[in-house]
Image: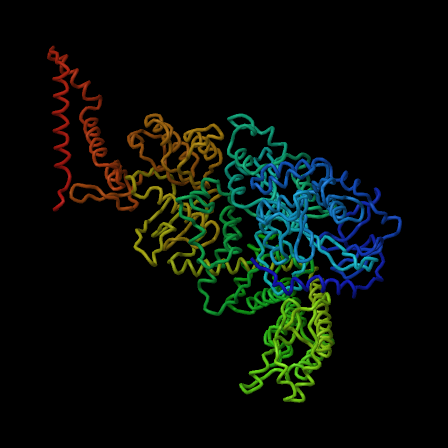
Amino acid sequence: MATIPRVHSMALSKILGRIVAKADHSMPWSFKSGFTTNQFKRNGQCFQVADRSKPVVRKKVNQYTCYSTLKTLAAPENHVQESTVKRASQGVGQTHIDWWSEKLQQCRKPLTKDMMKRLKFNNPLGLDESLRGGSLKKGTKSAELLEMKGSFPREVFLCRTGDVYEAVGIDACILVEYVGVAPVGRKDSVPKAACPVVNLRQAIDELTQEGFSVCVVEEVQGSATGRGRRKERFIAGHAHPGSPYVYGLAAQNIDLEFPDAVSVVGISHSETGYCLIFASEIMRTFAVEDGLTEEAAVALLRAQRCHKLYTHVSLQFESTGNGSWGKRGLLWSECRKLQHDWYEDDPVDGLLSKVRDIYGLGGSAEFREILVPPGERPRPLYVGTASQIGIIPTSGVPSLLNVVLPKEANHLCVSYLKNLLLHPPPHRVAECIQGACAGFKGLTSPVPDFTCVSAAKLKRLIEAKEANHVELSRIQRLAEDVLYMSNDPQLTGVLDLLLEPAWLATGLRIGRKQLITDCKMLTSKLGQMLASEGDLDQERSQDADIPDDFFRDFEDSWRGRVRREHAEEVYREVDEAANELISAVKNDFCPIVSHSDGDNAKGLKVEICYSYDDQAVWLQGKYDKSLAGSDASRDAAIKGLVPAVDAKGKKVGEEWWTTRRVESALSKYRAAVENASVRILELLRAIAEDLKPKTEVLIFVSTLSVIAKTLYMHVAEGARRNWVVPTLSSTDRPMVLDDLVPYWNDPARENVQPNMVQMNSMFLLTGPNGGGKSSMLRSICAGALLATCGLMVPARHASVPRFDAIILRMMSTDSPADGKSAFQMEMAELKTILAEATDKSLVLVDELCRGTDVGKGSFIAASVIETLDRIGCIGVLSTHLHDLLDMELRTINVVQMAMGTSEVDGRYYPTWKLVKGACRESLAFEVARKEGVPADVVDRAEELCVTKMLYPNGLHAANQDDFQEKGAKRSDDERMTADKLFLIIARFVIKLAKPSKTQ
């Protein structure tokens, strides 16, 4: 987590105040400006102000200063009448207050519960006016916050107060509960809590991770009043899940860690199936995934975080075999976990309206739809498929994502590949990805670093004009990487192939020619403005007598950002002021400081030090007055010393000294540095303003770079593992996977049993326990999925047809919340598979009907494999139901395959080799012994097995038949003696069949 250095944080308000002072106040108010329609309500009338991402400062009753444009916006007098706090509170509505009340009911900490006792739910802040600090009278800080809260009623407000950010009322309770800060203030006052300035971003991160949105209120020095200078407060910015707080970043030398974008999700239902709408506030985009099955919808929901989930009323009319959606079902259960709300109207427009309300956007805020390239596209993975190959993390299942990329891959690459696998691309895009992988594999020329930066991060920072030199330099490198690829003979073809995947990921279609033109413009523009590393004219001031930390703290925050030629005046001003300070220190301090081990060192114990808190260079130490007179220059310097004072005029301490000349030089230097900081900040924001028209190009280029980096790293890891770039064949061709290995095994580091898989029909797969049936199904699924996405496959050779769906169904568990047993869940999944499978599908089913009795389960399995054969899909149905092998199935293309076994000394062992034929040996007893089941339990099981084999109808039934033939009767003792004799014989036979330990 990036933190702001303390000295920079303390200077931030001063810098912003300086910007305000320098602002041009001549710009008239205009309703035709490019601002969005956030509105302040004043006496029932509305006037437009800047977009909330552009902070607005209220300076006077009739003026608003926008930091982003450094302009003061003057409203007509009839539009700026002060609204009362009562009206602001009424505007929020009881609905939002109730919403906060529900959130507080989830708090568990004793401190939080104690604070909640002092809340009063009659205003959105929860302030009790009868308590200390609860006054909501006009002009108070609480009244000002309450008015701001009216525009963003469901956000936690953090207000800058000195060196902390303070929260009051409900917001204070949330801060204590989820950030862990301690409450402040007295027991008879309204609830208050605060976090230090340096911990602001960490506190915001913790709140947004819990699903809260945060509004940050900053303060600057306002106009002078009779009691001093009044503090002016303004909304500096907002933070939401997936969208961090960015205000002030342009002035900071930090690299903000930007999380993956989090969407607001809507779910509806139509004749074609379920529909998921993903709307991103930060990207101002939405994507529609239609015609989904219930399992596919759940997989997409589980694969990513959502800020808020809305369910459309159309779901209330959708019915399943188990009744209405609201009673049972996999999707219903998933939505219930995520705490959804209902909405009406058009599924898309209604959701976008909700997004505008959540984020406080104007009604005219536009969202761009992400339209994917045309062509046939495989259906998204079912939740069971994604879970059983580890794309969705599942306990005990090896993760496919952990092996397709090296461990050092960044989260952007992992996220891209995860989304690609969850919803495989159209076949034409998969062919482009396959071609790019082949191009990277055969590459001999050097490749660029492929700078990876979040497209959402760039868009947010550029639009807020908060992109610092770090991000602007990355943009320059992104453009340079594209130009390098376009000029390299081996990479230019790869660049062309990457345009289609970038189109799929962004919904933006930019041709090669336009892309090259825009990248040339970006490199030229940024190259002319940004400073280069190692520029000699960017070196900070330095002197042997002044601690280097002093100049570092003052100058490193702005030097090396832009070329000196664009700010020559302020650079020269700083250099002159620094030289004046150096001269003052040499003349006034150096004569006093001893640089030798002589007599002076024994008497004078002083040195030149940097006071970090006061941002000053002073003389520190005590001296012996008895040595005065030994040196005239030293005596003159000592007489000029005065006690050092802080910014408030208070004496710092007995050991800190300065001179009037040094203090004058310090003041000039501080002012020069402040002017330079302001000027550099203005230039950086001007660059961001110039880049705004190219925001879509930046999104496209950054996404293309992430894709290129992902595929290059994937090819490098695949080559290390001896994987192969697949061939994508037509649908009527068989799937061939030569020397297929489990994806979680590394052939480069361990011995792995490869298998030859050639499929053009359904396999009926049998084999022993632990013989590799489930591993074979996972391996085939992963190989087919990777090839369908155009990625490398864990095999020596791979030719995979264009599937329209890849379905893997393995073990099922019960769902008590839905009132379903494991077998019911299995049948629900089977219903979807049979309904969705086509002759272009790959269907893999592991041990069907294991949750019911063997007889009826065998019949169901037999009917299922007949149905899949009739559909014409290819795949595998593995089973231990050996009765299937003896049934006369009505199939045409079903092939019996088995996981092989080998016999050694009369005992069978799995070979993990796929062979033709059937295997009726389960090796159940051997597996039980291997896993440590007590020997007497296994022995008894073997005895029962032999009994069943010799007497299918039971031992007692055989004895009874014998008695009836002879017409004789036995007593109970005689019958028990016969039973014991048989068991003794059975144990003896089993013992003889086992190999001895010496063999």
Camera sees residue 331? yes
Q: Residue at x 59, y 62 (%)?
A: 255
Residue 698 in percent (x, y) is at 63, 60
Residue 530 makes an appearance in the image? no
The residue located at (32%, 51%) in the rendering is 754
Name the side, left or right, on which 199 lies relative to 793. right
Q: Which of 723 and 634 is in front in this view?
A: 634
Whole-percent x and y of residue 954? 21, 22
Relative to 469, is 327 on the left or the right? left
Q: Nearer the viewer, residue 937 or 982?
A: 937
> Quarter-wise, where is residue 232 in the image?
bottom right
User: Residue drawn at (43%, 42%), measured in percent from left and top?
Assistant: 842
Q: Where is residue 543 in the image (x, y as percent from the top left)?
A: 62, 80
Q: Considering only vertical position in the picture, is 591 above or below 410?
A: below
User: Is 787 placed above or below 451 here?
Assistant: above
Residue lying at 14% horizontally and 44% vertically, measured from the top left:
997
Residue 712 in picture, x, y percent from top left: 48, 61
Asked whether 320 or 92 is in front, the reply is 92
Residue extending farthest to the top is 967
Q: In which quarter of the image is residue 94?
A: top right
